Image (cartoon, rainbow, N blue to C red):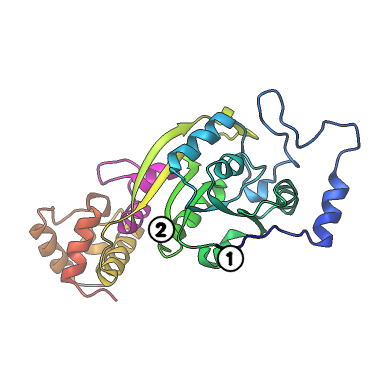
Amino acid sequence: MSKFYHLIPSPDVAREANSRRRPAGGSGRGRPDQAGVRPPVAPARKRWGQHFLASPEAARRIVEAARLGAGDTVLEVGPGDGALTRPILATGARLVAVEIDPLRAEALAREFAGRANVAILHGDAMEKPYAEWLGQAGAAAPAVLVANLPYNVATPLLTRAIEEPEAIARAVATVQREVARRFAAGPDDEEYGFLSVRAAAFSRARVLFDLPPSLFRPRPKVVSSVLELMPRTPPLVPVLRRRAVALASLAFRSRRKTLGNALASVAPRARWEELLEDLGKSPSARAEELSLDDFLALAAKVTVP
């Protein structure tokens, strides 16, 4: 059985926590209010894009959508004040939580001290692969990523998740609604773009439900969505996938141009027009008119650097 451990706060973290604690007899920080919502450990930091889930019912709904069981390993990025952490642990799953905020990491480690199935790690999840975070906690991979992600880093965190299948089996995450729709969009959708193609090359994306700003603290200016990312089965052939994603990247980088012009650095325009006609597309088609399957078909016919 994998052994989990708790974060032991460093002296500088402890000093910062002590300096910002409220005087004795204050609000009783850490105790749930009448709605079952725990007061924040400290004010949210804008630089970390923090908007904490403040609805226990929404947290339970997200965890239910993740379909967790006692045999699962869960990676939670940005647990914050623990709104998702507690219902995740209630499923019996093993949890590794990575928190960038030293005060919140210290508070969660203190709250869950002595529990063998949880590790609270302090650090920036972007600093190293997910497999290394899991390994640091002695946790088995692959894990299920379940998180309320900071808006400012949600896209790179999720694209890394789908591109590390050895570490992340699937993901259920709360993100800005616009970002969720970009992940799940198809060629007929307004939000369709390179991110949509890149995500489809590795996963099946589905928007599960929306969450209004009133369910977060501090209240954001946008609606959030819970996004599910499941791996493609079977996965695409890696070489062909890389070529198709590279073509899509070039095409969407110049999305106002026809594909023949946007991809002229790879092959002559006449060649692209011929291949597009073979796909039943107009010779003047642009990037947003092609699906992942179309880019795969093009990548099979042209050598991509």
- Which sits in the foreground, 85 or 158? 85
- Magenta-colored segment: predominant secondary structure: helix
The single residue placed furthest to the right in the displayed view is 24
Which numbered dot is residue 76? Answer: none
Residue 221 image offset from top left, x and y in percent? 56, 34
Q: Quickly name the residue at label 2.
A: 162
Disc 1 element: loop
Amino acid type assigned to the residue bearing label 1 in the image: Gly
Residue positioned 49% across, 41% down in the render: 176
Residue positioned 75% across, 49% down in the render: 110
- Left or right: residue 171 versus residue 92 is left
Specify whether residue 197 is painted magenta.
yes
Which numbered dot is residue 138? Answer: 1
Q: Is residue 90 above or below residue 93?
A: above
Q: In this rendering, does residue 180 appear at all?
A: yes
Question: Which region shows up in magenta?
Answer: 178-202
- Which sits in the foreground, 98 or 60? 60
Q: In this view, does 199 lie above or below 206?
A: below
For the C terminus, give its image quadrant: bottom left
Q: Earlier in the sequence, mark 1 or mark 2?
A: 1
Res 227 quadrant in image:
top left
Residue 303 image offset from top left, x and y in percent? 22, 75
Specify whether residue 231 is painted magenta.
no
Residue positioned 66% across, 28% down in the render: 36
Residue positioned 70% across, 23% down in the render: 34
Amino acid type assigned to the residue bearing label 2 in the image: Ile
- Left or right: residue 81 versus residue 65 is right
Q: Please tell me whether mark 1 or mark 2 is closer to you in this view.
A: 1
The single residue placed furthest to the top in the displayed view is 34
Label 1: how many Cα within 10 Å (few below 14, some 14–19, many 20+): some
User: Distance between the Cα atoms at labels 1 and 2?
Assistant: 22 Å
Residue 22 image offset from top left, x and y in percent? 87, 39
